[in-house]
Image (cartoon, helix red, strand yellow):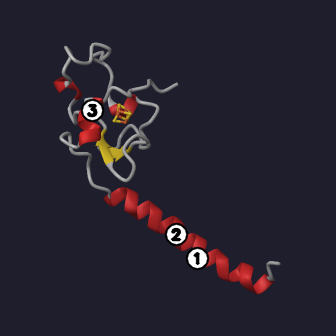
Amino acid sequence: MTTRRSFIQIIPLAGALALGAGSARADAPKVDEKDPQAAALGYVADATKVNKAKFPKYAASQVCSGCQLYQGKAIDASAPCAIFAGKQVSSKGWCSAYTKKA
Ligand code: SF4
């Protein structure tokens, strides 16, 4: 049973965790193109450098900021991506998991 006192003690902790999660995201390291997962997906921080022979589905207008999995705003230079947990991708990047925003 949750008492009123224990409920009041939980609220500040939940708030601190939420703030902590937010700052961790802002400070998260960028994805390294040489990281095995990034390399397997053909991730590049500059979409104009996509290996078009290896990833023919790439189209010139595709960039991370227009991808469904990009978790930032269009104006952010980099942001977290659902594929690369705990890291940030460049807004101008691309990988083969690209899915156009609805
Ligand atoms: Fe960029 Fe989308 Fe690939 Fe993430 S899944 S790296 S946002 S193209």
- In the image, taking residue 86 as reference, residue 102 lies left or right, namely right
Identify residue type, mark 2. Leu
Residue 76 sits above or below residue 93 on the image: below
**Residue placed at 75% from the left, 86% from the top?**
5
Whichever of labels 1 and 3 marks the residue nearer the N terminus, that label is 1
- Tag nearer the camera, 1 or 3: 3
Identify the disc placed on residue 40. Answer: 3
Q: Secondary structure at mark 1?
A: helix
Residue drawn at the location 38% of the way across and 27% of the way down: 98
Q: On the image, numbered disc 2 is attached to which residue?
A: 17
Q: Element under label 3?
A: helix
Number of marks present in the image shown:
3
**Which residue has dot 1 on it?**
13
Q: CA distance from mark 2 to mark 3?
A: 33 Å
Task: Decide which of tag 2 and tag 3 comes sooner along the chain.
Answer: 2
The three-letter code of the residue at mark 3 reads Ala
